[in-house]
Image (cartoon, helix red, strand yellow):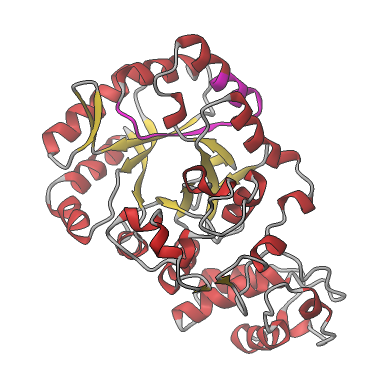
Amino acid sequence: MQYRHLGNTGLAVSEIALGCEGFLKKDETSFAKLFHMALDAGVNFMDLYSPDPELHCRVGRAIRERDDFVLQLHLCTTWKGGQYQATREINEVKRSFEGALHNLDIDSAAIGMIHYVDAHSTWEAIQKGGILDYALSLKAQGVIKHIGLSSHNPQVALEAVESGAIEVLMFSVNPCYDLLPASEDVEALFAEESYKKPLFNIDPTRARLYETCLRRGVGITVMKAFGGGDLLTDHSPAGVALTAPQCIHYALTRPAVAAVMVGVHTQQELADALAYETASPSQRDYAEAFANFPKISWSGHCMYCGHCAPCPKRIDVATVTKFLNLARAQGEVPETVREHYRALDAYGGDCVACGACEKRCPFGVPIIQNMKAAKEMFGL
């Protein structure tokens, strides 16, 4: 298992992590087999949005002796009549979170994740209705170490990140959702009509969100990497089925992404996701599949897929391009981006315009032009 830094939190998390939905309504034996299979593979990170007391007790028992296990525990969910509900009522938020800690038998959680903020009005209510203040007080007491927020809406997520209050963002990331514009209606991500017309390149707001998170040191944890499983079937909105390693690799190559929370219900589904860790570069490679999607085009947009390598001057073209895009998005060179660029082994200015990279690029990216732009932007 590979581990990644989660933004500026100081946490090292497994790049393959667990969603919790697949663990619901399982008997004790089935839960234990699936959970311990993940632990044995080196998974040390889980998103726990569900307020189900029984699930909390089981997870608490399973991680009791694991000091390195990282929980992403949600605020703003509550358990009523044997069912999950989202809530913005501050007293319910407090009771539910305190109950979750009790059932998990823990004193603190690494991440307190403000749950499901898809509308501007919801983000305003979070800020003005006491919920953000409550999260800040939990952090001040050490009950949570870091404040997070989950969203499917890139515009709202960007507002939250730019507020400076959020250290971790849980966001829906996959090659189909990334094409769509911001919306407060999460159903638009799944709707067939959203994909009927030709789509071109990543939505600019989504690109800006990822780049802003990277610049600010906000770690991204990924939900919906498989589009609820749709991307793995012939009914995929992409028009062709992708594999689990391809979907995971796409998510992990986005700026600021640290981990993919895989939603698995069976040991075979978990094995398919964990296979990413031993998959060959060709098994992870999504570029050829993406380049042949019907009605979807990433022409001219760097996907950070690495097909441009190797460079005779040892330039890491994808990373140079990523830093260039960060600086372009800001209209200036942030100090952190400049220092990361200078730490590279080779720079855009080392490009000799041989053109080998452009011949290999599946998306027709003007790499030589980008390398010249990087030299002008960074002075190297």
Instruction: Describe residue 210's horizontal placement relative to residue 233 as left or right.
Output: left
Does residue 58 appear in this view?
Answer: yes
Q: Give 229 or 259, whichever is nearer the viewer.
A: 229
Taking the view exactly as shown, the residue that stands out farthest to the top is 29
Q: Give 285 or 328, whichever is nearer the viewer.
A: 285
Residue 271 coordinates in the image, percent (x, y): 65, 30
Q: Against 226, is 346 above or below?
A: below
Could you tell me which quadrant the C terminus lies in?
Answer: bottom right
Could you tell me which quadrant the N terminus lies in?
Answer: top right
Please name the residue shown 68% across and 84% down the image.
366
Residue 343 coordinates in the image, percent (x, y): 68, 67
Please name the residue shown 31% across and 59% down the image.
160
Instruction: Describe residue 127's horizontal placement relative to residue 54 as left or right.
Output: left
Does residue 14 appear in this view?
Answer: no
Residue 356 coordinates in the image, percent (x, y): 84, 79
Residue 371 magenta: no
Q: Give 276 or 321, whichever is nearer the viewer.
A: 276
Residue 35 magenta: yes
Q: Against 110, is 258 above or below?
A: below
Instruction: Describe residue 124's horizontal placement relative to residue 282 as left or right.
Output: left
Taking the view exactly as shown, the residue that stands out farthest to the right is 312
Q: How many marks?
A: 0
Occupied quadrant, residue 238: bottom right
Instruction: State the extent of the magenta-drawn residues as a range.
Output: 34-51
Q: Against 324, is 87 above or below?
A: above
Residue 163 coordinates in the image, percent (x, y): 29, 62
